[in-house]
């Protein structure tokens, strides 16, 4: 998945899009997918999540992950959602877990409960401080995600994924330090990185080159954010350091009161992005579903993924 050769990019940019791409070859396997959900807060949102899970499950994702609210605020809900996935589906769950606001012992206990509930995959994160505050490690806690990865490896032999930032994490002192941090997380025992979402595909392809040059060989799975609410993505992106290109703003311009058109525009943007990634050899994708299945399902279909019969 790390073939970032310019000729492929050029061919895709100037050539036919829906013919001659990798999935057309008889021996080309559809990509591996993973889906991210958030734990529901209300009965109605719970219903929405399970409708989403049921719609996406036949696409046979490699795993599905459930986020952990800022500061561990959803600890019980994340656990309940992951446990229900274990009990009621054949999906492989991954539980997000963060360091903020807890001692190492408390975090280890949460991890142990996951292991006892049959969860074998953790997405290990530092987490963010409450809005308006700057980050400082909890006394007696894991300071950074790399420390959490090392701690989890002592709790049980979890599969561990970590976060990566093609546009550099906003708190990093410089891009090289951020890359070194990613390497530390992988060296500590993580086997995959999932990226923050990005909209300029070339940013991710360049990031892969930087990772390779830094000696990082683990899969760096692109995080894909299908956009249906452009205004909220603009707001969220400003907080997490993802840039929203001007061309995207132009595409969504005038759709503020037209949810249906926004969805269709978002579909085209994400489909074009994943096709460009696929044409450059990317064979694994992580979708930020926001507990809504439709765009993710359609994009997976375009990537050549078909439901199990
Ligand atoms: C795929 C994905 C899933 C996510 N899921 C969640 C979730 O479920 N819940 C949630 O609350 N948040 C989630 N986040 C957001 C994440 O918690 C924030 O981006 C957070 O600010 C950083 O987490 P991290 O694990 O990348 O931190 P780290 O890898 O620890 O890095 C954080 C920052 O500290 C720097 N750094 C690392 N080590 C050191 C050191 N020793 N000294 C100085 N600086 C250092 C890094 O360069 C970086 O700038 C997710 C992000 C991604 C990409």
Image (cartoon, rainbow, N blue to C red):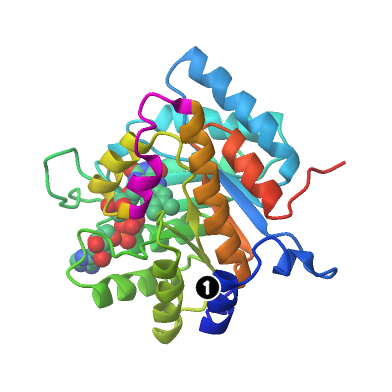
Instruction: Reply above or below: 82 against 197.
Output: above
User: Is 165 situated above or below 230?
Assistant: below
Residue 101 in percent (x, y) is at 24, 41
| Rendered view: 177 above or below 70 | below
Q: How many marks?
A: 1
78 vs 302, nearest the viewer = 302
Q: Position of residue 112 (x, y in %)?
A: 49, 44
Q: Quadrant of the C terminus?
A: top right
| 150 sits left or right of 280 in the view | left
Residue name at image x 56 percent, y 65 percent: 277
Identified at 72% across, 44% down, the residue is 59
Look at the image and tell me whether residue 301 can be seen.
yes
Q: Which residue is mark 1?
A: 218
Give the quadrant of residue 254: top left
Residue under the image location 60 percent in, 60 percent down: 275
Which residues make up the magenta segment? 247-259
x 39%, y 74%: residue? 183
Task: Give the camera-side residue of 280 and 193.
Answer: 280
The quarter of the displayed image where residue 166 is located? bottom left
- Residue 108 seen in the current view: no
In this view, the residue in front, 205 or 83, is: 205
Residue at far top of view: 43
Q: Is residue 131 left or right of residue 102?
A: left
Residue 74: image location, x then y, percent:
38, 30
* In front of the other: 240 or 163: 240
- Left or right of residue 236, residue 34 in this image: right
Q: Considering the numbered disc 1 on the image, is that residue within a helix, a strand or a loop?
A: loop
**Percent coordinates x, y for residue 87 in the rendering:** 68, 30
Which quarter of the figure is the N terminus placed in? bottom right
Q: Does the magenta segment cover residue 99? A: no
Ligand 1's quadrant is: bottom left
| Image quadrant in which you'd find residue 253 | top left
């Amino acid at each position: 998945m790390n073939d970032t050769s310019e000729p492929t990019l050029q061919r895709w940019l100037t050539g036919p899009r829906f013919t001659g791409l990798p999935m057309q070859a008889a021996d080309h396997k559809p990509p591996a997918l993973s889906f991210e959900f958030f734990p529901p807060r209300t009965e109605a949102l719970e219903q929405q999540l399970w409708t989403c899970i049921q719609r996406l499950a036949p696409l046979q994702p490699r795993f599905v992950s459930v986020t952990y609210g800022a500061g561990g605020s959803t600890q019980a809900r994340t656990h309940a959602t992951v446990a229900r996935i274990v009990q009621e589906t054949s999906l492989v769950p991954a539980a997000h877990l963060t360091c903020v606001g807890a001692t190492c012992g408390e975090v280890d206990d949460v991890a142990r409960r996951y292991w006892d509930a049959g969860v074998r995959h953790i997405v290990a994160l530092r987490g963010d401080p409450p809005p308006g505050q700057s980050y400082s490690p909890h006394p007696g806690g894991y300071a950074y995600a790399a420390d959490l990865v090392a701690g989890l490896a002592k709790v049980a032999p979890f599969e561990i994924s970590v976060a990566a930032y093609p546009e550099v994490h906003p708190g990093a002192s410089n891009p090289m330090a951020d890359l070194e941090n990613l390497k530390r997380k992988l060296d500590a025992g993580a086997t995959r990185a999932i990226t923050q979402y990005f909209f300029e595909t070339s940013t991710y392809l360049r990031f892969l080159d930087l990772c390779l040059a830094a000696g990082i060989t683990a899969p760096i799975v692109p995080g894909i954010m299908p956009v249906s609410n452009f205004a909220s993505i603009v707001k969220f992106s400003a907080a997490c350091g993802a840039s929203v290109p001007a061309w995207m703003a132009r595409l969504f311009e005038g759709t503020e009161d037209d949810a249906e058109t926004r969805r269709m525009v978002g579909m085209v943007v994400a489909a074009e992005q994943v096709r460009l990634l696929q044409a450059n050899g990317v064979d694994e994708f992580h979708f930020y579903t926001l507990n809504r299945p439709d765009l993710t399902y359609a994009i997976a279909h375009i990537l050549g993924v078909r439901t199990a019969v």
